[in-house]
Image (tube, grey):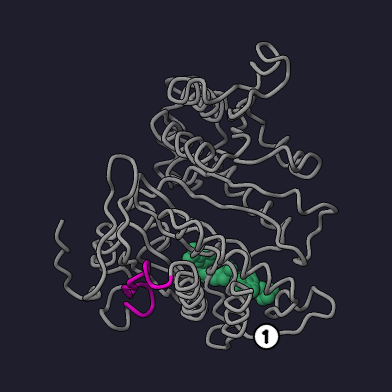
Amino acid sequence: MSSPKFDLLKPPEEGSAIRPADGRLDVPHDPIIPYIEGDGIGPEVVSAARRVLDGALEMTYGGRRRIAWFKVKAGREAEEDYGELLPEDVFKALRHYVVALKGPLTTPIGGGYRSLNVALRQTLDLYANVRPIFWIPEVPSPLKEPWKVDLVVFREATEDVYAGIEWSPGSGETRKVREFLEKEFGVRIRDDAGLGVKPISEFASKRLVRKAIAYALDKDRRSVTLMHKGNIMKFTEGAFMQWGYEVASEEFGNRVVKESDLWERFDGKMPEGRLLIKDRLADNMFQQLLTRTDEYDIIATTNLNGDYISDAAAGLVGGLGVAPGANIGDYLALFEPIHGSAPKYAGQNKVNPSAEILAGAMLLEYIGWDEAANLVKEGVKKAIEAKEVTYDLARKIETASRVGTQEFAERVIKGMGT
Ligand code: NAP
């Protein structure tokens, strides 16, 4: 497939495109990877992450594998240079090159896009928001046993109350919907209520759970928990759970075991090499994450539950500066930190680049370069263990010495070599 014609961007002359192939990716030894630096602290953390990734690749593969980086402007930088926050070329580049690294983008206040991030996710149909949550030794945590946290949350990202189907109190739309509900179904809603719609479809639920189970099997994880509030919202949250179990049994057969079958068929003992599929009510899930932390592994859930649980879980292991994430579609994947553009710290070489660096490690794993990904994670761990950290961690770790963003990246690179 030849490169698309770009109006504004210029891809690198070296390197080749990753190609989707029968449910997997065909990755060349020199993939072209677009990167969006983003706004605020974005350029600093992205440059730190690229340095670390390049270092890890050199150390792991000695030049046999490398990334051909392709700078793609979006956000404030694109607006200044091209007069648009998200030019069509950005979408073209991401569609063609399939896998990309991204810094945070500021959400413009006022007209235009609701959020550039939402626009990217919706236009590219990046339906799975994936957040690995694990503890790094020395990072302050409110838990007594933070080492027990090792989760990956798969959050459905296109539906639920986030679909944006809402009408304000007193509006003509709200009145019409209210009258319709009363006339057709005898449902009474107060005159001064706002209204929202929560669509949860079989298609979107199944593709999300399918991705979570495939990931869990591929990475030899122990269980997938379907988190839902189906006791109250039976036909949305409850249906999500039902469809999740259907995908598990219809598509993964005897590679998985349902929790209900564990006692009935296997006397409570998990058969070797199989994946446990269970479900938990959302409220219980929050409690169990604190009280039975190590019983949870992969969590697959709807959009709103996923938003809450992933931030709560990230808080258990040190918060925003160290939490990476990804937005993934059938093949397309955009890796980014969970934090935003923190504009008040922009240009100060101050913030923690760990989340962006770990997002880069996720990217390497996604393209199958696991050895290099592990080296990056090891480097971050060693830098933090050595207590040479950025301000956010330095203020919480006794006896830590404080370093800047780029110096921290150097410590990570140093840590990878030892
Ligand atoms: P934020 O940028 O995440 O910053 C909130 C606070 O989190 C910072 O003041 C800082 O806390 C801490 N923090 C964030 N990143 C850090 C890092 N790398 N190292 C250390 N500390 C870090 O959230 P926000 O201020 O609500 O959002 C700013 C803009 O970012 C908004 O326009 C928002 O829409 C956008 N945003 C974008 C994305 C995305 O692109 N995916 C995600 C979220 C938000 P202290 O000051 O307490 O140290």
Q: Quadrant of residue 292?
A: top right
371 w.r.t. 41: above or below: above
Q: Is mark 1 within 8 Å of ligand 1?
A: no
Q: Say which residue appears at 16% left-offset and 73% top-offset.
A: 7
- Give residue 110's position: percent from left, percent from top: 42, 69
Q: Which residue is mark 1?
A: 403
Residue found farthest to the bottom: 348
Q: Secondary structure at mark 1?
A: loop
**Ligand 1 quadrant assignment:** bottom right
Residue found farthest to the top: 264
Q: Give whichever of 225, 159 is nearer the camera.
A: 225
59 w.r.t. 141: above or below: below
375 w.r.t. 395: above or below: above
Whether residue 68 is in magenta: the answer is yes
Q: Quadrant of the C terminus?
A: bottom right
Q: Give whichever of 192, 160 is nearer the camera.
A: 160
Q: Given the image, on which type of amino acid does mark 1 rest?
A: Val
- Give residue 79's position: percent from left, percent from top: 32, 78
Q: Say which residue appears at 70% left-offset and 62% top-offset.
A: 136
Highlighted magenta segment, given as a residue range: 62-78
- Give residue 380's position: percent from left, percent from top: 63, 69
Q: Give whichever of 330, 156 is nearer the camera.
A: 330
